[in-house]
Every structure is written in structure tokens, then in C-alpha cells.
Amino acid sequence: MITDDSRCPCGLGEPYGVCCGRFHRGDATAPTAELLMRSRFSAFAVGDTAYLTKTWHPKTRPVDLELDPGQRWTFLEILGKTGGGLLEKEGTVEFRAHYRQDRRADSMHENSHFVRVDGQWIYVAPVG
């Protein structure tokens, strides 16, 4: 179980409460596409479907979001990014998300598209 004092799953090395936890609680919004990507990975790791839904573009988000209870997200690698900065309106973040499923380690690779809507970054869909 991840607590506010636990190391944040996003990989930045900060305690969860002052890293992605502040985004999940609504105390702050992610200022860049990369930080939104990291906070979404952490939301998968802690099971925060409300945050995932809130930060998913309404045109592409699923109607029901159910996480697999047998899947445990373990760490995130950011492989590259384009745009997505403080003053930009679009960006991509390429990543590899590692997880354990049925005692086996695996990963998923994606290059995600993000846009800023009303000043907040949201996830749209995989690129391509």
C-alpha cells in the first residue's frame, strides 16, 4: 500500500504525498505533459480511477474504467517527449510502464498524446 510518505511510483524519488499525491487530491494540477503522464502512472499504481477519468479526454476515455486487481504497476521509464511544456498546448510522452501480472514481470510501451484544455493537461490517446 502506498502512503503519503512512500516513495512515489512515478520514479522522481519524492514522497507520494508531495509528488503525484498532490495532483490526485486536487491540491495542484500537473504543469507539464510529462508530469501528467507520471501522475497518471501513479494513479494506476494506487488504483485512483477517478483521477484517471478526470485527466482523460472526454472523446477518448472509456465509459467504465476498471483496473485489473491482479496487475501491480512497478516503475515507469520516460523514453522521450515532444512539446508539453509550461507554455505549450500539445505534447507527447513516450514511456515504458513496468508491471507484474500473475507473478510475471512485463511492460507496456506507448507514445501518448496530451493536450491542454482550459489550462490543464489531459491525456488523449496513443500516437499513431
Image (cartoon, rainbow, N blue to C red):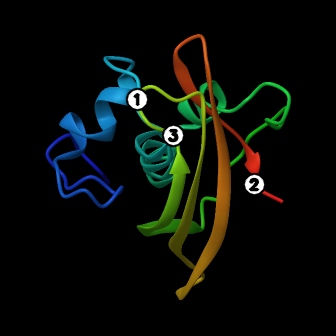
* Numbered tag placed on residue 84 in the rendering: 3
Q: Secondary structure at mark 2?
A: strand
Amino acid, disc 1: Leu
In the picture, measured across the screen, residue 73 lies left or right of residue 21, that is right
Marks 1 and 2 sit apart, C-alpha to C-alpha, by 21 Å
Q: Nearer the viewer, mark 1 or mark 2?
A: 1
56 or 111, which is in the foreground? 111
Disc 2: CA contacts within 10 A as few (<14), some (14-19) or many (>=20): some
Q: Position of residue 48 (x, y in %)?
A: 51, 38
Q: Which mark is residue 86?
A: 1
Residue that sits furthest to the top in the current view: 118
Q: Are marks 1 and 2 in contact (CB under 8 Å)?
A: no
Name the one closer to the observer, 116 or 1. 116
Between 111 and 22, which is closer to the camera in this rendering? 111
Is disc 1 surrounded by few (<14), some (14 to 19) or many (20+) residues within 10 Å?
few
- Left or right: residue 56 versus residue 5 is right
Quadrant for the C terminus in the image? bottom right
Q: In percent of the image, x 66 and y 30: which residue is there?
A: 53
Q: Nearer the viewer, mark 3 or mark 2?
A: 3
- Looking at numbered disc 2 in the image, what kind of residue is underneath it? Pro
